[in-house]
Amino acid sequence: MIKSQSSSRSKGGKRPSRGLSSRGTKKLPLPKDLLLQIHRLMVKSRALEDRLIKIYKAGESYFWIGGPGEEAFGVPLGLLVHKGQGPQYDWLHLHYRATPTLVAMGMPMIDSVRLMMNRATDVSTGGRNFSNHYCYPQWNVAPVSSPIEVQYSMALGTARVQQRHGTKGVSIVTGGDAGTAEGDFASCLVWASRPGQELPLLITVQNNGWGISTDYDSQHGEKHIADRGKAFGIKSLVMNGNDPVESYLKLKESLDYIRKTGKPVLLEALVSRLYGHSSASGANMEKGQVCCVQSFEEKLKKWGLLKDKEALAIRTEYETEAKMAQEQARQEPAPTPESVWDHVYAHNENGDWRNY
Ligand SMILES: Cc1ncc(C[n+]2csc(CCOP(=O)(O)OP(=O)(O)O)c2C)c(N)n1
């Protein structure tokens, strides 16, 4: 387990834009509207994931894995992405805990629920994959992979395209701490940092201290995963991914640096894993983990930006939306047996993939 979630201070970065609290007495770390937007999106993502777990537990889906505990990192990331299709926009190579990022980018809840319930209407996979395996070509979101960490070597490809086109687009990759033992992660560091050929790549690791049931401390000789970047001359940092303000500022600083220099950044975010690994381990709330939504709400209340009843109303609004999405998805069809090869092989005009 991660023993402490201390934050590292940014050095030499621009001062964050600041605003007054609603009482006008205290400086806020980010503008008030942005703080409240981040909070709403964090609650929305959590309410959605809580619903996905309920869907699993009600027997309306086969498996759940997801992002509760990563909202304070994922939401700021989604807000900072330059969203669009093609090399001039950012490319996302996400892992299976990235719901908060997509919610912040504008993904409707129903998309996630349809994927979870394997409906033919699921826009990411047509009901053929499991929870959190998103794919949005129109936003440069590459398909989430079940084999862990392969996204780190795939991200090199889109970063190379962006470099060749000379755009300000950045390729962004997310993934877990245990997966960094895979060769794809090492390949990513090597290819991102070749002198004179550096790539515009934001390499992030969401370190929740666990790889299913293997704890971080028994596997890592290095203190921080980010330390590995130093050997490659990659700008590297560790941050408290349970603090959305720190996440926003450090992610912005990193993305600004990459857009300006074309060089990579390795960013390790210390996060929580609130419901264990997945439904395979029960998907029940774990003790002793920091809940970023709760701790951010406490801060907003202290700063005079949020009242108890407002927090409850936001939560209720999103719980209702998620429940209605489930009810809608229930009415929708499962994929047909005939569609099993769709999007697997190229078809000829007769729908025949064998004689294409
Ligand atoms: C190549 C590969 N090996 C093993 C697995 C089985 N597996 C699925 S999740 C997981 C743990 C990943 O841990 P980590 O990278 O820390 O991410 P977390 O799930 O904790 O976010 C493993 C070993 C897999 N999916 N792919």
Image (cartoon, grey):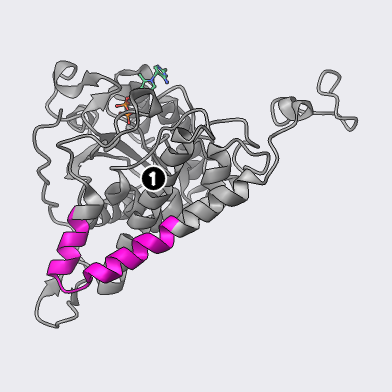
Above or below, comparing residue 314 to residue 218 in the picture: below
Residue 175 part of the magenta segment: no
- Tell me which segment is drawn in magenta: 295-319
Most extreme residue toward the front, as rendered? 58
The residue where tag 1 is placed is 50
Residue 311 part of the magenta segment: yes
Q: Amino acid at mark 1?
A: Asp
Q: Position of residue 302 (x, y in %)?
A: 12, 68
Which residue is found at the position 57% from the left and 37% from the top? 117
Most extreme residue toward the right, as rendered? 350
Which residue is found at the position 39% from the left and 49% from the top? 100
- 337 vs 252, nearest the viewer: 337
Q: Position of residue 219 (x, y in %)?
A: 19, 17
In the structure shown, which secondary structural element does the residue marked by tag 1 occupy? helix
Instruction: Answer with left or right where residue 120 lies relative to residue 315.
Output: right
Q: Quadrant of ligand 1?
A: top left
For the N terminus, give its image quadrant. Answer: top left
Which residue is found at the position 84% from the left and 23% from the top? 356
